[in-house]
Image: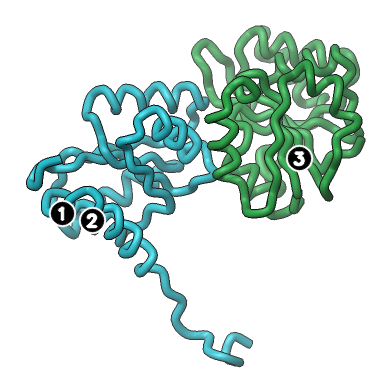
Chain colours: A green, B cyan
Amino acid sequence: MTFLLVRVDDRLLHGQVIFGWGERLQPRCYLIADDQVASDVWEQDAYRAGAPPGVRVEVRDLQTFTQSWNSHEDPGGTVVLIRGLEDLARLHQGGFRPEGGINLGGRHAPAGSLELLAFLHLTPPEAAALRTLIAEGVSLYAQELPGSPRYGSEILQARLTGLRE
Amino acid sequence: MTPGARISGVLVTHGALGAELLKTAESILGPQDDIAVLSNAGKPLDLLQAELEGLMQGMHPRVLFVDLLGGSCGHVCALMQRRFPRLLLATGVNLPMLLEFLHHRERVPPADLKQRLLERGRDGIRCLGWESGEEA
């Protein structure tokens, strides 16, 4: 299964995604893999209300997503959104292997986090999840917007080492 | 809402947009009370939501203004509006809409205010020039 973009972003569907990436990639569907949103119809409605006209917003809980991502009915370009690295690690363990790399797009400073990049603040469990994903050979890159710098796995690995010290 | 009571509001926006909008409005109308600003800059969604809840409990706003419905600000405000149906969520806030609110919030009933915000906000948007052929 090929997606236009698979992005880890704690804001899920928001301005940078809709206007920054969406204007470039022109997706017809945003597919949110998230337990919280999947359990809250109001929140799903709020995301749908904010999506561009004619663009579908689909929501799956993580378990359903791991079982169904490879048979996703793509209406002409889909962007997958995942809230955090621990969720991504769960999806990876469940067999999520999209073609192309996975974009780490935004983690805004939660309490007790360390700055990996200006737009990527990680808690210790999130940093551990990232180390594991890199060690298992998952292709990751950090990039906030289409025109902004791209940091590959090697750079992320080096920065993680710096965080640990 | 009795006539004469001042309706309070919160500007929930990206970056410094809300603060600058309010500052600019105050430079036109003078200092304003019962209006707060909340920025999403650097905040995870749950923190933005918690800060908005703090404002809800502290100042009981009736109107939330957001810049972008599809953004994180619009998202947390849409969730708040569902929880508090008496809230009005006004999206695409611009200076004409904010000035209309600040100027009329003590003078007109809420239903009229809602219509005024929509009309003034939209009416402020024009594209002048580039008549046929001139854009080339």
Give residue A138's position: percent from left, percent from top.
87, 22
Whether marks 2 and 1 lie on the same chain: yes
Give residue B38's position: percent from left, percent from top.
35, 35
Please identify the quadrant where the C terminus of chain B is shown. bottom right
**Front residue of B36 and B101:** B101
Q: Quadrant of residue B96?
A: bottom left
SS at circle 2: helix
Q: Residues under labels 1 and 3: Cα distance?
A: 45 Å
Q: Which residue is mark 1?
A: B108
**Residue B82 appears left or right of A83:** left
Residue contact between numbered discs 1 and 3, judged by CB atoms under 8 Å: no
Q: The residue under label 3 is which amino acid type?
A: Val
Residue pushed farthest left?
B4
Q: Quadrant of residue A149?
A: top right
**Residue B24 visible in rendering:** no
Which numbered disc covers residue B112? 2
- The residue drawn where x is 72% and y is 17% is A87
Chain designation of label 1 = B
Is residue A135 placed above or below A52 in the rendered structure? Answer: above
- The residue drawn where x is 79% and y is 42% is A78
Q: The residue under label 1 is which amino acid type?
A: Val
Q: Which residue is mark 3?
A: A79
Chain designation of label 2 = B
